[in-house]
Image: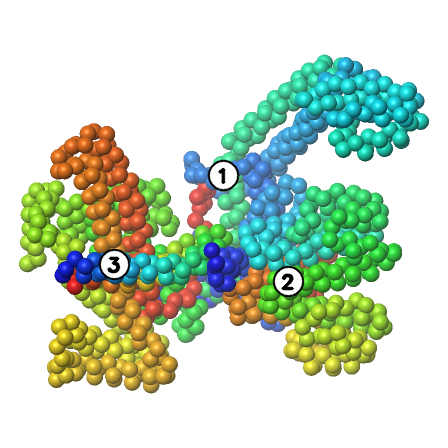
Amino acid sequence: MDPTQAGMVAVGAGLAVGLAGIGAGLGEQAIGAAAVGAMAEDEKFFGKGLLMTVIPESIVIFGLVVALILLFVF
Amino acid sequence: MLKPTKMTRVMIAGTKDLMEPAISTLHRLNVLHISDYSEENEDFKIGRPLKNASRLSEHLLSLRAISNQLGVKEKEPALKQSSGELPSRIDEKISELQKEVSSRFDDLRSIEFKIKEKEDLVSSIKPFFGLPLSLDDYEGYETLKVFTGYIDADIEPNISRITDKYELITGEHEKRKIFALFVPVAFADDVQKLLQEERTYVEFKVPGLKGNPPVLLDELTKEIAILKEKHASIKSELENIRKEYSEFIMAADEYLSVETQKAEAPLRFATSPNAFIIDGWVPSRKYDEIESELQKSTGGLVYLTGLEEEAKEEEIPIELENPGPAKPFELLINTFATPKYGEIDPASLVFITFPLFYAIMLGDVGYGILIAGIAVVIKNKFKSGGLNALALILFLSAVLSILLGVIYGEFFGFPLFNVEVKGEMEYGLLGIAGPAIAGIHIPVHRFESVQSLLLITLLIGIVHIFLGLVLGFRNITIEHGLKHAIYEKGSWMMILLGGVAAIAKLMPALMSKLPVQSSDPVFVGGVGLAVIGIILLIKGEGFISIMEIPTLLSNVLSYARILAIGLSSAGIALAVNTLSMKLFIRPDGVLLGGGIGLALVGVLILLIGHLINLLLGILGPGLHSLRLQYVEFFTKFYEGGGNKYVPFGYNRKYTEE
Amino acid sequence: MGASDGAKYAYIVARVRAMKGKLIPRDMYPKFLNMEIPEITRFIGESEYKNDVDELGKKYRGTDLFEHALNQNLALTYRKLIDVSQNEANFLITEYLRSFDIWNIKTVLRGKFSGASEEEILEDVISAGQLRYRDLTEIVKIGTIEGVIAAFAKTPYYPALEGYKGVLADVENSLDKLYYSNLIKAASASGNKLFLKFLRTEIDLKNLKILFRMKRAGMERDEIIKMLIPGGMELKENDLGRLSAMSFSEFVRALEEFSYWKAISDISAELGSLIHIETRLDKYGLVYASSISYYYPLSILPVLDYILSKKIEVDNLRIIVRGKETNLPEDIIKAHLVM
C-alpha cells in the first residue's frame, strides 16, 4: 500500500467510527433523558435505564468493526 | 435449575374462630404465597381485619410521627428485642414518648417565635442609634405627629412651606440619612402627602419600647442569648431522647408492623359470616410442613387441601431455584422479567455466558485483579440484596478476566510475555516468552489477531443465538405444541444455519474475486435450508415476517462488540502507557531521561488514565455483555411476565419471636 | 441544540409514567372499604404519602391528618411536575394546574360566604397552582367577601371576580369560563393540538355534568346556557343551546348521537341518579386520557393523564374516608368511587 492509500484507509476508518458515533448519540439523547426521568422516580429503573441507553451503541460497534476490518484485515 | 420451584396450590378453610391461630401459624412459617381474594359474591366477601388492627395502626401512626420528629434513622440493632415483652410496655411507652417529645417541640417552637420577635425588635431599634433621642421621646403626644424614616432629599424647605411649627432631627444610619419629624397633628396629612411624593422616603416604625436605644439593644441581645441557650439545651435533650429510644422505636415499629400484617391478613381471604377460605401457593416440598403445623395449632379443625387442578399459568407464583454460584444471576433475570411458570429460567445459562463475554471483552490481568478486589469490598459491605448479588457477579467476571488476561498477555495494557509485534520484539513484564497450551501460542495478541478473533466472536454469537432458538423451540412446544414450534423457531434455526453455511462459502469467494462454486454441496445445502426456513416462516407468521430476517444478521454481527469493546479498552490502556512511557517516564528509551519531574507527570497520567479505563472497564463490558443476553439471547425464547413468589411472613430485624 | 419533538418530552413522560406506576392499585379500594380510618391512613403512610403522613402526624389526628396529608401530597406532587418540566411542557402544565387556583379561590369565597372558620377553609385548600399557600393563609384571615376579592386584585383571575354582586354562583361560573378560555388561548398559542383536544373533551364532560345537574334541578334554558362553558369538542355551541332547551328525557335521548353516550348508556335506566352519571363521566375522562396518552406516548398527554389519575386517586381516598367518618353504607361509598 502506498502512503496515500494507507492514509485514505485511515480516514475511512475514522469516518466509520465518527459518523456512527454521531448517529448513536442522536439516538441516545431521548433514551438517556427518559432513563434519567424514570430513575429519578424509582431507583429500580437504574438497571433497565442504563441498558436501554446503550442499545443504540450497536451502531458505533458496527462502525468500529468496519474500521477494524479496514485497518487490520485489508 | 432451569425451572422455577414447583408449586402446589393450597386451599385452607375453617370456621372464623380458627382464623387467628391459622394466621399466626402461617405467618411464622413464612412460606404461603396468598392469592388475594377479589371476586366478591353473595356468599363470600373480602374479610375484615382483626379487631386490634385499628389500634395497631393508631400506634404506628403516632410512633412514626415521633420518629419523624426525632429524626430516627434505621440502623443495625445492637440486640434483638423479645416480642414477648414488647407488647406489655408498648402502650405506655408510646404515650410517654409522645408527651416528652411533643412538649419539647412545643417549647422549641415558642422559643423560636420569641427569638424571632426579639430579633425583629433589634433590627427595628438599630436605625434609632443615629438619632440622639430616647425611644420614649417619639411617643405619647396628643397634639404632635411623629414621622420617622430614611430619606435622601432635604425636605426642610418643603415642610417649612406647610408650617413653621415643626422640629426636624436628622442623623445617619449605615450611611443612609434618617430623620425624625415632629409636626402638629393639624398638618399631619399634608406632611404625609409630601413625604409620600418623595421617592427616597422609606418609613420605619418606632418600636413600642422605652429607654435609650443602646441600652435596650444590650438588654435584647442578652435575652436572645439566653433563649438560644435554652433552645440548644432542649435540642440536646431531644437528642438524648433520640439516642435512648431509637432502638425501642425501631423494634416497636417492627413489632407493630408484624402484628398489623397479621391483623390485616383477612383482607386477602374470602369470608362468609362464619367461615374463611385462604387460597394460595406453597413450594411443593413445603406442603407437608404447612399441613402438619396448621393441624397442630388448630387442633386438626381446619380443612386443608392441595389442589392438583390446572391453574392459569400467570397465577402461579415464581420462585427461582438455582445452585449457589448461579444464584446471584437471578438478579439479572428478574431485572429483565420474572419467567412464567412453564418457562425456562435462564439464570444458570447466564451464569456461564455473562462472565465469559465480560472476560473476553476486558481480558486484562491488572484490571481483573483490581475489579475482583472492588467486588470483594462491596460484597463484604452489603451482606444481602441487589448490591451483594452484583458484587458476586462482578467477582466471577473479574476472575475470568484475569484468565483471559493471561491468554491475551496483558497487564494494564503492558505486555505480560515477550511477543513479536509487526516484526519488532516487545519485552513483557515477565521477561519470558509465552507458553504454548493445546497448540495455541500464548499470548494471543489482540491487535495482531483481529481477523481470527472477529470470526471467533461471530461464531460465539451464532452458537448463542442458536441456543436461544433451541430454548424457544422447547418453550413453544410445551405451550402451543410442536407445529407452532417448528413454524416459529424451527424456521429461524434453518435460516440461521443455512445462512451461515452459505455466507461462509460466499465471503472468501467474494474477497478473492473468484466465481462462487455453485456446485459446492455446503453452499447449495445452506441456501436450500435457508429457503425452506423462509417458507416455513412465511407460512407460520405471514409475509411481513420477511422483514425480520435482516434482524437476524444484525443480531449475529452484534456479537462483534465482544471484540470491539475489548479492543477499545486495550487501546486506551495502550495509549495511556505509550504516552506516559515514551514521552515522560522513558523519553528516548532512557529511564528518567527527562528528569524526575517529568517522570512524576508520567506517573500521574498513568494513574488517571488507568482509573478512567478501569471505570469504563466495569461499565462497558458489563452493560454490553448484559445487552447480548437481553437483546440477542432472551428475545429468542424468553417472554416473562410471571408473578413473583412473596410468602406471607416477615423478615425480622429488630425483634424476635 | 434542536432536540426533536420526541426527545423534548422523553424525560418528563418517563418520569410521570414511573409516578403513575406508583399510584395505589385499583384492587386496594375494596379492601379500604373494610378498613378503619387509622388503618387506611397507615396504609397510605407506607406508600407515596409517607412523608406527608409522618410529618403531619405531629400536628393532626384522625381524619384531619388524612385530609391534610392528601392535600399536601397532591399539591407537592403537582408542584413537582412544574419544577421538573421544561419549556413547552412546563408552560402547559403550569397553565393547566391553574384550575387549582380557581378551586382555591372558590373554596375561600364559599367558606367566607358560609361563615366557615379559617381552619375549615384551609383544610380544603390545595395549593397546586400559582397562588402560594402562604398567601392564601393570609387571605383567609380577611373577614369579608369583598375584602377577599380585593386581595386577589393583582391575580389574573380578578376580571372574573370584580363583577361580584352578592351571587356566588355567578362568580364561580365566570371563574370557570375564564380558566378555560385562558387555557384554550394558551394552548392555541403553543400550537399543541393534542393538548387542545384533551382540553376540549374535558370541557364537554364538564358541560355534560352541568347539563345533568341543571336538568335535574329543573332549570330554564337561559339559566343553563349561562353556566355552560364554550369551546367543547363535540358539544358545539348550537348543540349546547339545543340540549339546554330540551326536557330531561328528550335530553337523554339526544345524547345518543354523541360518543359520550357509550359511557352512560348501560345505566340509562337510572340516569336520574347524579352520582352514577358523574362517576361514569369521570371514569370516561380517565379512560380517555389514558388511551390517547398511549397513542401519543411522547407528548403532553401522558402528563395530563397522570395529573388526572392522581387527582382521582386522592378524590377516591377522600370519598372513602369521609364516607367512613359519617358511617355511610359501603355500597354507597363504592358508588361514588371512580374506578
- Determine whether, in the image, residue C4 is placed left or right of residue C213: left
Per the image, the residue denoted by label 1 is: B73
Residue B150: image quadrant is top right
Q: Nearer the viewer, mark 2 or mark 3?
A: 3
Per the image, the residue denoted by label 2 is: C189
Badge 1 and badge 2 in a common chain? no
Decide: few, some or many residues near mark 3? Use Cα within 10 Å; few <14, some 14-19, many ≥20.
few
Tell me the distance, in whole angstroms, between the alpha carbons under discs 2 and 3.
Answer: 48 Å
Residue displayed at 48% across by 51% down: A40
Tell me the distance, in whole angstroms, between the alpha carbons under discs 1 and 2.
Answer: 50 Å
Residue displayed at 80% across by 73% down: C215
Is residue C87 visible in the rendered structure shown here?
A: yes
- Determine whether, in the image, residue C127 is placed left or right of residue B652: right
Q: What amino acid does circle 1 point to?
A: Lys
Say how many tags the image has.
3
- Label drawn at residue C184: none
Q: What amino acid does circle 2 point to?
A: Ala
